[in-house]
Amino acid sequence: MGAGGFAGAVARYWLAGFIAARSGGNFPWGILAVNVIGSFLMAWLLAALPERFGPPETVRLLLSVGFMGSFTTFSTFSVDNYGLLYQGEPLRAVLNIGLNVVLGLLAVWAAFAIARPA
């Protein structure tokens, strides 16, 4: 998992920076691209690998938890919410999305409020 995590972090840094440098910097296109690509790849790994290749558990962990977990945790967030929707739990999915976004932003606000000198 550590090797996958290292590779995922490097890939995220490179791809986000590559896209940001070419998009003018007026919108976080690099991170958006990483999140969308990561969501697609995580879902593909979870859906395709077991059925097509049946990799050993170590390979699955290297790719999903290691690489994808480091590339973007948003991919896990997206797959979790898809799972809730697929299970017929749209209210729980909306609650999860709302809580993650609102509480995440509140946590950032609180951290800046605490860290900035008065």
Image (cartoon, rainbow, N blue to C red):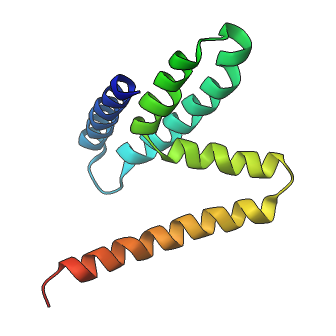
| Residue 116 percent coordinates (x, y) | 17, 80
Q: Is residue 77 left or right of residue 32?
A: right
Residue situated furthest bottom in the rendering: 118
Quadrant, the N terminus: top left
Q: Residue at x 29, y 74 (%)?
A: 111
| Residue 6 percent coordinates (x, y) | 30, 29
- Label count reads 0
| Residue 67 percent coordinates (x, y) | 42, 29
**In which quarter of the view is residue 41 placed?**
top right
Q: Residue at x 76, y 51 (%)?
A: 84
| Residue 12 percent coordinates (x, y) | 34, 36
Q: Residue at x 54, y 42 (%)?
A: 75
Q: Is residue 117 left or right of residue 41?
A: left
Residue situated furthest right in the rendering: 88
Asked whether 13 or 33 is in front, the reply is 13
Quadrant, the C terminus: bottom left
Residue situated furthest top in the rendering: 53
